[in-house]
Image (cartoon, rainbow, N blue to C red):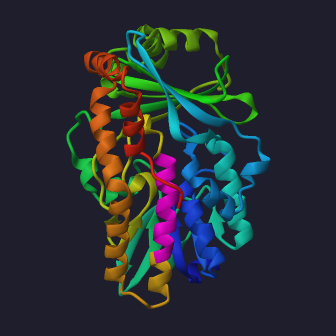
Amino acid sequence: MTQEQNKIYDVVIIGGGLAGLALSIQLAKADYNVALFEKEKYPFHKVCGEYISFENWNFLEELGLPLSDWSLPVIKHLTISAPNGNFIQNDLPLGGFGISRYKIDAALANIARLSGVEVFEENKVSDVAFENQMFSVQSSSFSCKAKIVCGSFGKRSNLDIKWKRNFTLKKNDKLNNYIGVKYHVQTNFPSNEIALHNFKNGYCGISQIEENKYCLCYLTNAENLRISNNSIAEMEKNILRVNPFLEKIFSSSEFLFAEPVIISQISFEKKTKIENHILMLGDAAGMITPLCGNGMSMALHASKIACKHIDSFLKQNTSRHEMEQDYTDEWNRFFSKRLLAGRIIQRFFGDNFLSNFLIRTIKPFPKFVSYLIRQTHGTPY
């Protein structure tokens, strides 16, 4: 029996993405005993647009990230194109910066370790049981116990399936059967701009990250891949590159990955914030459509919300039920309108006729474009 198997943690966090890492650092700095399980080994790439709104800058620096020293690209301008090449351009009301998940996740993991978090890499959690106000956590290496467990395991995990969470049981439709594909490229593109280029049943974003590299990431439905003989290259050639902007990007860029990073079965269905008394954060709690560019912001902000309510419970100021309800209510207050706006906007983009029509219609009204952007973004917290 390992030492960890005898251990009772204040908090166990499943998943070492932005939400899980940020939460672990905050709790460790508050002198709680925290374990974080991550199935991969840092650093690693993951499907993500790699654009973070400036609403998170101060919070990330408070966690210990030296953002000001990293010379990251500042992104203040947005271009959106329809499949036919028609486009609109607009300033981003708040703006953001580009950074790869490869860099930021590994840096946060290092801060977590230095803060006292026990980070268990290459360690997949297979089961969690709740009994007598205590959790039993089983991973690929050992089991342990915890007073609180948080789920920050991304868009879809083995635990989602095991627990039969509602979104995993839905029939395939326009909200729950997407694939995401990401590359890093070197190309000739403005460093202060993020672009979203629509194609049939999908859209592709590009923006600069560190070291003069660019993140090229797109989302499309599984049907596009099926009719392309399950070939990513064929799908890109025959569907994405119909958009003249994407044709130029794909034909003139140097692709830095041997193979793209791919994730499937992405769902934008509503998700519960509490599952079997486990607090959900990040994409495990709900995904905003990537065209809104705000998933990482929501993950980070949710970690701060969760930390406050977990701290109150561990100090015995609130009951478990109150903690769960308060967290759910505050999460919904900050994010539910963003998710709704994202789902509505998503229905216009990726459809040839609707996206062409929308861009043509709103092009003369830049203030309305700014309004739409604000509906999916928050303010510094």
Q: Is residue 284 left or right of 269 when viewed as pictured?
A: right
Considering depth in this image, is 156 or 216 the residue closer to the camera? 216
Residue furthest right as drawn: 69
Image-quadrant location for residue 173: top left
Q: Is residue 50 left or right of 306 when viewed as pictured?
A: right
Image-quadrant location for residue 335: bottom left
Percent position of residue 259, x then y: 59, 25
198 up-or-down from 219: above or below = above
Percent position of residue 267, x then y: 33, 42
Residue at horizontal 40 percent and vertical 55 percent from the top: 284
Task: Tell me if I can see residue 45 in this picture.
Answer: no
Residue at horizontal 33 percent and vertical 67 percent from the top: 328
Is residue 303 within the magenta segment?
yes
Task: Tell me if I can see residue 294 in this picture.
Answer: yes
Which span is picked out in magenta? 295-308
Residue at horizontal 59 percent and vertical 68 percent from the top: 24
